[in-house]
Image (cartoon, rainbow, N blue to C red):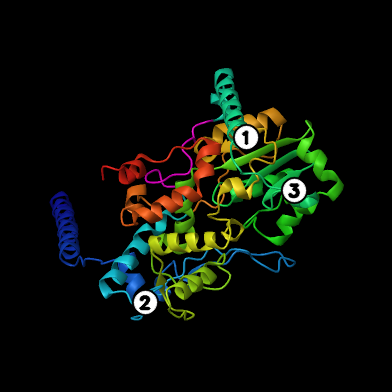
Amino acid sequence: MRLLKYIVLTLTAATCIAVALICAFLQDEHSIVPVIIPSKEYLAITNISSNPFHASNIKKPRTKPHDKKHVESRQSTTNISSNTTRTVSSSIPSSVVSNASLALTSQGSSLDHQSTTGISSNTSHSVTLSAWTSEKEEMVRNRYELRKDLLKEKCLTTSGYHVGEGLLALPLFSCYNDKYKVLGCVSAKAGASTWMTHFLRMSGYTEPIENPHTEWAHRLVRARQVLQRQQVAEVLNSPSTTRFISVRHPISRLISAYNNKFYYGRVHVPREGMGGTALYIKLIMEMEGTKFHEDQPVMVTFRQFINLILYQKTKGIQNINNHWGPQYNLCYACSVPYDYIIKQETFDEDLQYLTDKLNITEVKVSLKSNRFGESNKTYEDHFRDIPKDLIKKILNLYRLDFLLFGYKVPKFFKDLLSPQR
C-alpha cells in the first residue's frame, strides 16, 4: 500500500507540474504583445529630444581652459518638426522635408566611419607592417618619383607659383616638426585632421586629442607659428628637410566638403561656430535675395553650393574657403620644392613609406581622424542637375589640381560635355 501511495503521489505531482508548465506556455503564447520600436525617422519627426542627432543630445567635446575658440563643432543639428523649414532660397514642400529628415536619420549611423561605397577618399587600407615587403616599398618609392617628376614638369608650364617673403613663403596650412625636420602641407578635406594629429604626436603631445583644429594645437605645429623668419629659407631649401604635400581628387574633395559643411544637403539648423557654415548660408541667401533667420531649418542644395564657390572665385581665388579652394593654391605647389606627394587614394601605403623613411615612431598609420562618413551618391548623382556651363567653370577652377597631381577628369564629365550631347 505504501508503494502504491508513493506511486500515486509521484504521478499526481508530475501531472500538476506538467499542467502548470503547459498553462504558463499557453499564457505566454497568448500574452505576447508586439513591441513597436519607434524608428529613427519617427523620432526625428515627432520628438526632437529623442533624436540623437539634435544638438541638445550631442555631447560637446571638451576643450582646454586656454582654448578660447573651438574652430569647428561636429554637430549635426536638426529641427525637422518645424513647419517653416526651407531651403536657402525658398520654402520646401512638406514631402521634401520629410524625405530630407528620413535621409538624415537613416544615414546618421554612417557619420562616424568611412563608407565603403560611393565617393571614398581612401582606397588603400590593407597595408600593415606584416604585409610591408621590399617589393611594396619599391613600388611606392617609384610612384613617389613619378608624382614628383610630374609636378615639376607641369609647374614649368603653368602659372601656379606663389610669391611670398619670410613666413609668408610658407603655406598657411603647413605644419613643421623640428625633431624629424619635416614640413607638410595638407589642405582641408585631404586628411588635414589626421595630419594635425600626427604632427601633434611628433611634437611630444601625448594627451587625448578630440579636436586638433584649435589655437593651442596650431601654436604647437603650424609652420608659421613654430618657425622664425630666418629659418624659412633653410626649411624650404635644405636637403636635410623633408617636404610633402597631401592631396585628394578634386571632385571627391569638393563633394566631401559639401557633405561635411552642409550635411549632405539635408535639413539642419545652421549655428554660429559651425566652421563658418552659417556665414556661408547667409551669403547664399544674400545672393538669392532672401533673408537669413537664426534657428531656421534650412537645406542647401548642391547647385547652391556650386554657385557659392563660383561667386567666391569672382572675388579672387584667395577668397575661396580652404575646404574647397584649389589645393595647388593652398599649398603653393609650384613654389615649395616638395619631395613627396601623398594622395588620399593611396594614403596608408604613402604614409607607411614616409614614416619608415624618416624613422618616425609617433605616427600610427591606421589613424583616420574626422571620419565624416561619405554618402552613397556618385559623381553623377551630384552633378546630374548642374548646368553644363557651371560644370565647365568648376572643372576650370580645379584644372591645375587635375594637372599638377595627375588626377583624371571623371568619364561622366567628359561624356556630359562632349560635343555630341
Q: Label 3: which residue? A: 169
Which amino acid type is shown beneath numbered disc 2? Thr
Please state the extent of the stretch shown in magenta in the rendering. 114-127
SS at mark 1 in the image: loop
Which amino acid type is shown beneath numbered disc 3? Ala
Instruction: Give me the C-alpha separation between circle 2 and circle 1.
Output: 51 Å
Image coords of residue 398 (percent x, y): 50, 47
Q: Label 2: which residue? A: 85
Q: Which of marks 2 and 1 is nearer the N terminus?
A: 2
Q: In this view, does 348 lie above or below 142?
A: below
Q: Label 1: which residue? A: 156
Image coords of residue 397 (percent x, y): 50, 50
Which amino acid type is shown beneath numbered disc 1? Leu
Q: How crowded is mark 1: few (under 14 residues within 10 Å), some or many (20 or more)?
A: few
Image coords of residue 168 (percent x, y): 75, 52
Identify the residue at horizontal 53%, vertical 59% (top origin). 313
Q: In this view, does 3 lie above or below 90?
A: above
